[in-house]
Amino acid sequence: MKSIEGSNAVISGKLEFLNPGGSIKDRTALSIIKNAFKDGKIKEGDSLIESSSGNMAIGLAQLCKYYNLQFIAVVDPMANVSNVKIMETYGAKVIKVDKPCDVDGWLGARISKVREMMESNDQLYWTNQYSNKANPNAHRQTQAKRIMKFAKLFLNNFQNKRTFLIFDS
């Protein structure tokens, strides 16, 4: 939080790029993995798979390393080379699709590859960031609570000042 001299404005920022994996997707990855453990869907040593253009895969790769899980990231040619190297540094196996799906483009191609791999290996757990309820719940349980905490702080302490909230995700 920063007051601007000579002004009645207060600026506050929430910088998700400072998370260990560099993005807000760290929250999603942690929520999905913790819920999968809690629900008995995975155990130490299991293999996870996800379709990602980068940030989600980095979040999952770092947490899989921490929780002693194997991780396969299915990416496409648009994936940043640095992001792929980060995933591999955490021990992820990176598989790159080489042709977009006619209807759903690169996302469709990545999801098709995930499904194909799951059909041939029933030991894989798809974290499925696109429909996993732990994804939005991560933000409700962490980010939304922090935003509300700061909003109350602003209301209580800075009622007569203009407040700007800056969020990086």
Image: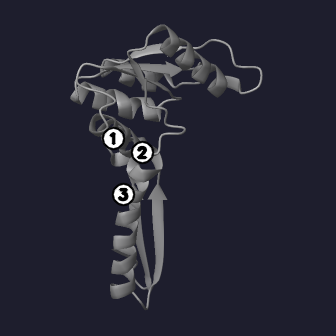
Give me the C-alpha separation between circle 2 and circle 1: 7 Å
Q: Position of residue 121 (x, y in %)?
A: 44, 10
Please identify the residue farthest to the bottom as the structure is shown: 160
Mark sitting on residue 141? 3
> Is disc 3 surrounded by few (<14), some (14 to 19) or many (20+) residues within 10 Å?
few
Pointers 2 and 3 in contact (C-beta within 8 Å): no
Give me the C-alpha separation between circle 2 and circle 3: 10 Å
Label 3 vs label 1, nearer the camera:
1
Amino acid on which the number 1 mark rests in the picture: Asn
Pointers 2 and 1 in contact (C-beta within 8 Å): yes
Pointers 3 and 1 in contact (C-beta within 8 Å): no
Q: Position of residue 53 (x, y in %)?
A: 53, 29
Query: Looking at the figure, which quarter contains the N terminus?
Result: bottom left
Report helix, strand or loop for mark 3.
helix
103 sits to left or right of 107: right
Amino acid on which the number 2 mark rests in the picture: Ala
Tag 1 residue: 35
User: Which residue is at 39% across, 54% downward?
Assistant: 15
Q: Is residue 7 visible?
A: no
Tag 2 residue: 134
Report helix, strand or loop for mark 2.
helix
Of residue 67 and residue 147, the one placed in the foreground of this image is 67
